[in-house]
Image (cartoon, rainbow, N blue to C red):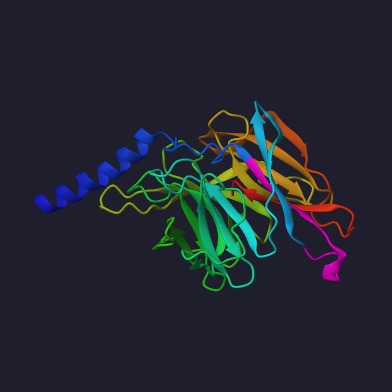
Amino acid sequence: MIRCHLKRLLGLAWFLMAIMSNGVRAGDCALARNTLVVERYNLSAEFGDPGVIGSPNETETWGTNGPQVEPGPKYYSPSNQWRLLAVDDLDTNSPGCESVWKNVHNGLAVVRRNPDTLRAPSSDMPGEASPMPEVMVGTGQLLLSDRNAELLVQEPISQQLWILSSNFRRTLLPIMLMPSERPVGVADFNGDGIDDLVVQQIHNGQYQIWKLSVDGSTTSSVPTLAEIYAIVPAKPVDPGWNLASVGEFDGSGSPDLLWINQGTGKAAVWLMEWTPQGLVRKAGGITSIDLGAAPTSKDIHTRRWRIAAPN
């Protein structure tokens, strides 16, 4: 009986720690949630097919100014080996942000720390690089045993989700996904201090919020699936739009949704709010962004881009 009560008290402690955080992540990474990071590429004829991505010649940040998303500092990062996967506060004991880069040739990944967090690693392989065969889903505060952000990744074949810390230590996220379900983002949508998942139902293209929680009757700090909520509207009317990123773009502290149109290169932010019915778009809450040339452009004289963070 005493052991049972002790387990419940320890479980309650994890839950209270999440509540006290109130969805606000510790640390000093200003890029973690309210800055859009865009990797922009030059297409070069030397690659033969002009549709092949060349070396990224710059990493741009787009900062928030109220509901607007405006261009910010640029970081020049020439590299034909490394792709930026994420920017977040993966280590609150280290100043500033950490960025995660993956080598496209050998699949090794590395975490870079300030002050050059948005500059690609050198051509030399860093000694701390680790294998990362999984597909990136997003970053979030997924382990309540600390205040760090972690990576959420998915195995391509088994579709199993794993939580990766900054040293690439893996923790299983006990959530089963069907082949028709695709996780596309991570954020704390209802403000309980536990990040949730955005999941797309591939058969109809609609998106949902999978709310995560920690079982108060156990001592585990790993969240599990609690409930599934709707996103209203569930998707844009035009089928050319896809969800690209989740971030706090209007400074309200509530996560918003960023959509891109692969054909036109246009982007749009949906400003969202949490309700008992789920995640609902605010009245008039659509902000358009023009990031330049379409990301799928075949014109070698135009630049191509992709959104690297937030995920």
On the picture, is 114 further left or further right than 237? left
Q: Position of residue 234 (x, y in %)?
A: 66, 46
Foreground of the two, 51 or 125? 125
On the picture, is 182 further left or further right than 76? left
On the picture, is 78 further left or further right than 301? left
* Residue 289 in view of the camera: yes
Q: Residue at x 64, y 59 (%)?
A: 83
Number of numbered discs present? 0
Foreground of the two, 283 or 101? 101
* Residue 199 in view of the camera: no
Q: Position of residue 132 (x, y in %)?
A: 52, 67
Q: Which residues are magenta?
A: 36-53
Q: Residue at x 70, y 64 (%)?
A: 80
Q: Relative to 237, say whether 47 is above or below.
A: below
Q: Position of residue 190 (x, y in %)?
A: 48, 37
Q: Relative to 278, say whether 131 is above or below.
A: below
Q: Relative to 163, say whether 8 is above or below.
A: above
Q: Based on the picture, tell me whether residue 50 belongs to the magenta stretch.
A: yes
Q: Position of residue 1 (x, y in %)?
A: 10, 52
Q: Based on the picture, tell me whether residue 75 belongs to the magenta stretch.
A: no
Q: Residue at x 33, y 51 (%)?
A: 221
Foreground of the two, 50 or 124? 124
**Extreme-top residue of the structure:** 66
